[in-house]
Image (cartoon, rainbow, N blue to C red):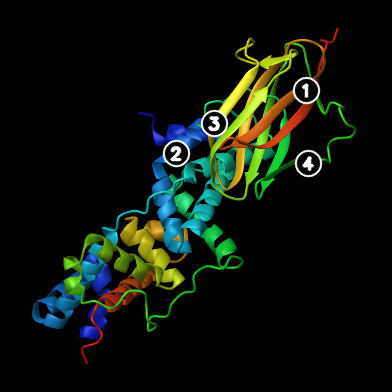
Amino acid sequence: MIQETELIERAKTGDVEAFKDLIEAYQVKIYNFAYYLAKNEQDASDLSQEAWIKVFKQLPTFRLDSSFYTWCCKILKNLFIDIYTRRHSYRKELPLNDELDTKAVAIDSLHILEKEQRENIVSNAVTSLPDEFRMTIILTDMQGLSYEEVSKITKVSINTVRSRVSRGRERLRKIFTNVGTF
Amino acid sequence: MNCKKIEEFLSAYIDNQLSPGLKKDVDLHLKGCLNCSKRLADLKTVVGLVSSLEPKQLPQYYQTQLDAKLAESIRQDSRRFSLWTSFTWQMVFGVFFLGIFIGSGVLYVSQKTIKKPNEAIYSIRINEMGVLTFNLYSKENVKSIVFNVKLPDGISLASKPKEKTFHWQGELVKGENVISLYVKGMKPGNWSVNAHLQSDGTILKEFNMPLTVTEKKG
């Protein structure tokens, strides 16, 4: 099994097959990051594919001072900010108090819903978060990155990451909690 | 420490991001506070729900689109890479670049590079190999496309000199599609490569590409 560093070194010299092996290793994760940023399949495809092209072009500058995946996420995040927040229209963010597609459900009762229904509720709740909270929750809770890695990707301090994680999860908790009891 | 303060630390507590001293304070508070314990349990549920979300699967044409974009990016950068084994919908025998655009089912060839009728645009020498790259731009995904190429006497497929025809069957994805063909010059002269694109038995477009094979120098 070829080590990732060897693939990266080969890809840096222009070995497209090596680069495609790298894509294969991370394309689902990168696509999912793009999906929850862009909030729809078409934009997610465009965003993630543009990110891979940019990764390939910038590969000679990659110095292995972070993980390859972290570096790819940083490129995708920058693309999202540069292209999708300034130029492209995408689904309008819903403030917390607006009615969402999903009804508020008791957090304790989520587990009894059918898996697909539950996944839709959770997925919609995540996509309803404001950009900075959503990005942080995707990277920490969905992708399992550490606060340090998220700090490198989002270029904010670890304390800010900590705060965004806390506030993002709190928003999700409020979405899931039944608010109609008083 | 009061509940409002503790709530700020609960996420970091879940992620083991608290200093030992602070963790101890939170532990102590949680032991005696049902509200904060419930809130902690809810947050853990939130984390569990989000972390266990099934990853979204790649769309059906994602890989094909990405391959095409990567190939185009490489071509534009004029770098030399090995593309031969890359694409499942490409046969690797090449000739020259010709841009073909499909819009609303109509296929047209850019007239900008054609100076006179029957004037050869490209040329190769005898026994020289060249790459023909067909860029097919489609406004939508199209299934069951057949691309047929017929080579004249003076040109052959690079890896199969006795073959004079090339057939490719596959799908076009929305956006750019690339088909590359490698051919070899066999006999000097002005030749014409014939090709047509068809879908469901209907020929969408036929075209002829003039091509000159020249003698070797010296």
Q: Which residue is mark 4?
A: B110
Of all residues shown, which one is farthest toward the left? B32
Figure quadrant of the C terminus of chain B: top right
Q: From what the image shows, is residue A144 above or below residue B99?
A: below
Q: Determine whether the residue tagged by mark 1 lies in a helix, strand or loop.
A: strand
Mark 2, Cα crowd under 10 Å, few <14 / some 14-19 / many 20+, is some
- What is the CA distance from the residue labelled 2 to the residue labelled 4? 37 Å
Q: Name the chain letter of the residue that bears numbered label 2.
A: A
Q: Which residue is mark 2?
A: A22
Q: Are marks 2 and 4 on the same chain?
A: no
Residue B23, visible in the rendered structure: yes
- Nearest-to-viewer mark from 3 and 2: 3
Q: Are marks 3 and 1 on the same chain?
A: yes
- Nearest-to-viewer mark from 2 and 4: 4
- Nearest-to-viewer mark from 2 and 1: 1
Q: Which residue is mark 3?
A: B169
Q: Which residue is mark 1?
A: B192
Amino acid at pointer 1: Ser
Q: Name the chain letter of the residue that bears numbered label 3.
A: B
Amino acid at pointer 3: Gln
Residue located 46% across and 66% down the image:
A156
Amino acid at pointer 4: Ser
